[in-house]
Amino acid sequence: MAAGIVYAANIDSDVINISLGGWLDKNGYCDEDGCISKKDAGELKKLLDRATRYAHKKGSVVIAAADNDGIDTDNNGKNYFLPAESDKVIAVSATGPSGWIFNPATDLDIFAPYSNYGKKRVDFAAPGGNPTFLNQNPTCTIPFGGFPIPCGLFDLVIGPTAEPFLWTWASGTSAAVPHVSGVAALVIEKNGGQMDPNKVEKALKKGATDLGAKGKDAFFGEGRVNAAASLEPVIFKQALFLLCENFFMK
């Protein structure tokens, strides 16, 4: 993972989307491949921190999933979730509706029950799908595309699979991260194609829709990303520039 982050930075990636991660016990652990010590665990954390700091310094915005354990990461002191908890990484939680197919006006930003949370860790929220209705009504089906499907699937995120020309429904913070990455890419594009990662995050924060407790909170961070609002100041500046240019040309 560290090598991949460094590689992406070295080829001038504007955004590094990391829809994955893993838990690391700060005290070390043993598995079928052997054991690592507390010191080893600390060195692994430092390794990823160096990689993400390097990417940030090279101009890459690094965005990662907060994970899907429903854990309060502010009170989970013996474990790291990496790379979401690495330096200079924007961590993303997930939201989604419940029963949208029956009520399209339902709240689209319900905090997903599987999503990790924590005021120290979560920076932004984004659509990741909500399987609550699907789990409660496994037999509820409606015809779609000529065959019945569970109604709860419409509360999830649909996207392409590894197989060519196939699509599927899914939910998770891994599905939420690309929404933030996409908005970050739009912000960078509108600012000329090169932008300091700190300024990108500032634009995301300024445009985010504040949900939950006022200001930054444990579930939505700075808020659910909002593409239109994050781009609005840039679009306004461009329109003002064109207006002035046309005025003076006349």
Image: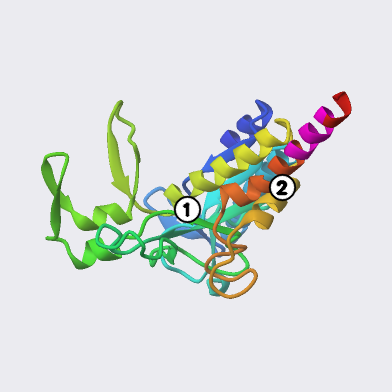
Amino acid type, mark 2: Pro
Q: Residue 129 location, x and y as percent?
A: 37, 55
Secondary structure beneath label 2: helix
Q: Quadrant of residue 115?
A: bottom left
Picture residue at 78% right of the left edge, 35% below the top: 243
244 is within the stretch colored magenta:
yes
Tag 1 secondary structure: strand
Q: Residue at x 59, y 39 (%)?
A: 16
Q: Is residue 54 visible?
A: yes
Residue annotated with mark 2 = 233
Which quarter of the figure is the C terminus placed in? top right
**Classed neighbour count for the residue bearing mark 1: other residues with Cα under 10 Å, few (<14), some (14–19), many (≥20):** few
What residue span does the magenta drawing correspond to? 239-246
The mark tally for this picture is: 2
Judged from this view, the residue extending furthest toward the front is 250
| Helix, strand or loop: magenta stretch | helix
Residue at mark 2 to residue at mark 1: CA–CA distance: 37 Å
Residue at the spot of label 1: 22
Check disc 1 and give the amino acid type: Gly
Q: Is 67 positioned to the left or the right of 43 in the image?
A: left
Which residue occupies the foreground of this view, 80 or 32?
A: 80
